[in-house]
Image (spheres, grey):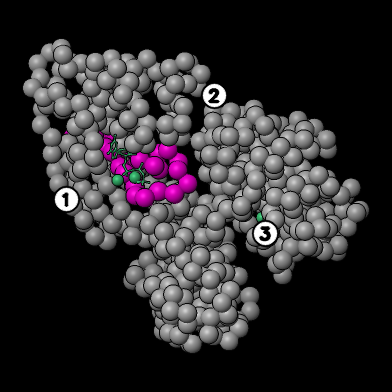
Amino acid sequence: MKNQEIAERLREIADFLEIEEVEYKPRAYRTAGRNVESLSESIEAVHERGELEGIEGVGESIAEKIAEYLETGEMSYYEELRAELPIDIEAITSVEGVGPKTARTLYTELGVATLEDLERAAEAGEIAEIEGFGEKSQRNILEHIELAKAGRERMLLGHAFPIARDVEARLGDAEAFGRCDVVGSFRRRRPTVGDIDVLATAPDPGAAMEVFCSHDDVKEVLARGETKSSVLVSGDLRMDLRIVEEAEYGAALVYFTGSKDHNIALRNRAIDRGWKLNEYGLFDADAGGGDDQDADSGDGEGGGVEATGDGERAGDRLAGETEEAVYDALDLDWIAPELREDTGEVDAAAAGDLPDLVGYDALVGDLQVHTDYSDGSHTVREMAEAADELGLEYLLTTDHGPNAAIPSRLDAEGLEAQRADVEAVNDDEDLAVTVLHGIEAEITEAGLELPEDWYDSLDLVVAGMHSSPDDPTDRVVHALEAFPVDVLAHPTNRLINEREPLDLDLDAVMGTAADEGVAVEINAQPERLDLDWQSVKEYRGTVPYVVSTDAHTTGELEFAHLGVAQARRGWCGAEDVLNTRPLEECLSFFGA
Ligand code: DGT
Ligand code: CA
Ligand code: CA
Ligand code: ZN
């Protein structure tokens, strides 16, 4: 599964070309990178079918480069560009505020080639000395570098997704394996994952380990045992496999899905009943024959199957084969993995009060997508066709308005032309999807600053902030109060692993949104997932949410499930999410 690796190469090529001030091409490479990244299958499989050029944004020349990389492990065009400027451009530009051109200056002036070099130069005060930089940019770099460093430790859920899905399918199909599930933080759909934990049964464990450790994607085998192995795959992602007995699969699922705090809450519940819960099952240690009553032996990640004795399985097994049976024996309703964070889910399950979570297939519309009228890659029609194919009932175009701080944005002429495009698509009887005409207006000190007559002509107004002012709360509150905003986009403007959330008084923002009838977005972009799930949980019931993809390409419409996952982690039911409702009902909330 080299999707991530290739997407990164394409992004780096775009950066290098941008530095050389090549026109158009950087955008083409970025688009191709985005589309490779959002593929829902492995790029190897696409290549095997000879369909690389079928990927949106991938033409003959980029397809050739991808094929070359898959066949030889190198992309010579990339190697040439990098030979001219031998720096880790992706890592360095992942520091907020450092773009490709800054990276080049830092290299030519100071020889900065890696993130470590950058940190050293900033700490030594060398960056402030460069012309055009100064103390402020140096401080800025120091402030953001920790986040960039941490970002290399934890992979975004959206980036881990195809990798996890691929290994699940691959092992599941292999003869040596029985069942196979990716567990851990991935199964809980945490916004980032530290590693990929795979749980499986295997009629032939030796052969299964061989399949796991010798696959093409494996860069390094870190540990190999009879029932537990660890490998490194593409992107330096660690993958752990544990093989367990069929009769213990449910207990292992619970244990290795975690979270650790959820496990502890469950184990305490077992202890209260005089029982013992670990990765092998739920046991009544006083009954039956057993020799070891160490109630704490489930602790520690190293507690793999092979390292433990029979004492772990002491007593009568009350449950173990299925998750449901484990929860049931503890007098609990089954708890969805997304809720297993020890934030009240065990008590709710005991009381029969768990929420009926919004389903992964519940969204019928998408209320934030970009087109080529601003920074999106595809036309209104292409986005509509892709949405139609996904079975969406409606789609809101939200290109950046005239007050956005980016070069490509909607002006009056663009707005008129786009409206004509929207009408044409809506008149096309072959497309069932309804396209709504909206905008993503920038929240500035003055508010939305849109020409007055635009508000009447647009179906809905989405407002978002893409800057980091000192008074973000005042600005957002003012925008929601003084302008006809329908949806507040990505409220905290965080970029996971890259940019801290705005320092917002969320009580004030959510209170204002509630008063003004503004819906709050859960943005499904892998690096955003904003509003964050903790806040989603806190303000559920105060404000209605929408889950939007903020797609900039047709492929990104498929990110929706990542946003749904965060809504679920925030305990949302379908009733909490407006775009689970049919078009008319959704629009009636907005008074449109
Ligand atoms: P990650 O990998 O940092 O994104 O987060 P997790 O939750 O996947 O953590 P990981 O990979 O260290 O372990 C997988 C699961 O195994 C974890 O969610 C719960 C379980 N586990 C690991 N260590 C312990 C422990 O010391 N005690 C208990 N009760 N469970 C543990
Ligand atoms: Ca994990
Ligand atoms: Ca692990
Ligand atoms: Zn935005």
Q: Is residue 501 visible?
A: yes
Quarter of the image where one finds residue 245: top left
The label shown at residue 356 is: 2
**Residue at 37% over, 66% down:** 70
Quarter of the image for residue 313 reads top left
Of residues 279 and 437, the one nearer the viewer is 279
Q: Secondary structure at mark 3?
A: loop
564 with respect to 152 (left or right)? right
The quarter of the image holding the N terminus is bottom left
Q: For mark 3, what is the residue?
A: 470
Q: Nearer the viewer, residue 236 or 350?
A: 350
Q: Amino acid at mark 1?
A: Arg
| Residue 315 among those drawn in magenta | no
Region rendered in magenta: 177-203
Amino acid found under the numbered disc labelled 3: Asp
Closer to the chain start, of discs 2 and 3, is 2
Residue 65, how many percent across, how many down? 45, 72
Where does residue 316 sit, x and y in percent of width and height?
18, 15
Count of picture labels = 3
Determine which of the numbered discs, if any, sits on residue 224 in the image: 1
